Amino acid sequence: MRNAKGLRVAIVGAGPAGAALATLLVQDGHDVVLFDDERRPEIVVGESLIPAGIPPLRRLGVEDAVAAIGMHKPGATLTWSPTHRFSFRFARYEKWMVPYAYNVPRREFDAVLLARAEAVGARRVTMRAGLTRGGGDAELVLAPDAVAATGWPAPDLVVDATGRARVSARLLEIPATTGPRNDVAHFAHYDGYAWDAEPGQVLIDRLDGGWSWRIPLNARLSVGVVLNRAAAAKLGATPEERLAAAIAANPILHATVGGARPLTDVATYSNYQLISTRGIGPGWAAIGDAFGFVDPMLSPGVCVALRSAEMLAACLAPFRGSRETAGPAALAKASEPYARELTHLLAAWMELIAYLYDGRMLALFRAGSDMMAERGGRFAQAVQDHIEANIAGLASGTSITSRYSLGLLRFLGRHGLRGVSPATLAIQ
């Protein structure tokens, strides 16, 4: 699969973004070294995929392998109070989107993508590759021992796929655009839990000071809480205390896992809702979480990682047979559309998720229910169906950057609430 005239690309990080990019670049005729430090957390956020992530898996040739290790995900249910609940199934909107997704154990999922990269010809090097500021034309370069491991005099392009470590942004002191939240997430896996929802359905519930997720995986359940700092501090000093206290305090969570057995330690995530103001430069680019990570809400992370790999690979396609023109400045110039498109994608997710946090999304659902109760009829139902299809398209990632869908949501958020107060439905 290699082409001597293709680019020499060093990818630092073998998670979903790095492995997907390695696969795509090798298939395009480039020579790729994928650095894998083999450090795998016990559990990783991003266990629930979304419909928009299925086409990239198909294009990578791994959907069957993902289905084998994953659990079919028919949809999601959002419960904000005993009287504010919205449940949807992707199959209802199959005219507009892939009608399903998967819940996946991340270690196995990541291994599927990494195996695919190696199968097509990416060279995996098991070491922790260092990055340093460049002293010549390239702004960021591999450390000397990592260059030696590639077998090249030097790579043409270094890709930061280090995830939330954001090595390139930290090293180059690139600031980030941040969202309004400053939350902390704690989660763990359990077995012996009680489940009365549809198999595979993801459940999201509003809590005092935050929200929770319940993601069914094969033979285990992922349970997490996302809390503002003040609420988290009141629950305890350690992640274990906070997660246990949140479960005990919430009747729904307690009914599900109050008598369950923990299978893992409690994992914690805190640095998210940020987008780098710059994700490319002479001789380097950042992909996936290293460029930006929005929020656990709605689970966009893995889909964004896969799409970022596709976007960057597309920008590098013109160099598949003309490596002699691939200087650091030329590669940076060619990658500008990628950076713009990914920034736009991340910003769209940030905006959509804000509608859930500030209560406008649930207020819209309530306003729609009120309209149907008051008016009914075919026209009202057609309007409601149209609105719900567009919101589902956004939440599934399928139309997240659609000007029409986003415009409709903005219009309804200002003029379509019919007196329903978003403040009463906001996540504190």
Image (spheres, grey):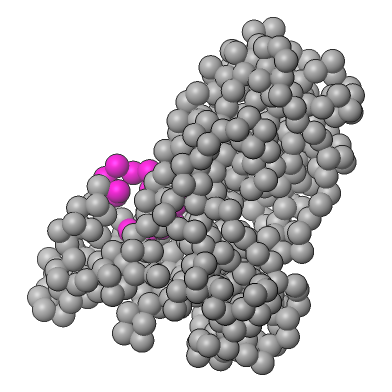
Determine whether, in the image, residue 38 is placed left or right of residue 317. Answer: right
The front one of 250 and 77 is 250
Residue found at x 74% / y 36%: 12
The question of residue 138 being in magenta is answered with no
* Residue 147 image position (x, y, % from top left): 84, 24
Residue under the image location 31 percent in, 85 percent down: 83
Apparent side of residue 135 relative to residue 243 in the rendered image (left or right): right
Q: Could one spot residue 240 in this view of the protein?
A: yes
> Which quarter of the figure is the C terminus placed in?
bottom left
Q: How many numbered markers are drawn?
A: 0
- In this view, 262 is above or below 381: below
Report which quarter residue 216 is drawn in: bottom right
Please state the horizontal and vertical placement of residue 153, each as a whole percent of the image: 84, 15
> Per the image, is 399 magenta?
yes
Q: Residue furthest left?
A: 375
Residue 24 vs 141, above or below: the answer is below
Q: Residue furthest top?
A: 324
Q: Residue 312: where, in percent of width, then height?
A: 58, 30
Residue in front for this viewpoint, 320 or 300? 300
Q: Residue at x 14, y 69 (%)?
A: 418
Measuring from the top left, give residue 197's x and y in whole percent. 51, 83
Residue 53 makes an appearance in the image? no
Q: Is residue 330 left or right of residue 210?
A: right
Looking at the rendering, the stretch of residues picked out in magenta corresponds to 391-406
Q: Residue at x 75, y 27 (%)?
A: 132
Q: Height in image: 374 above or below 273?
A: below
Residue 235's place in the image compared with 394, above or below, is below
Q: Quadrant of the N terminus?
A: top right
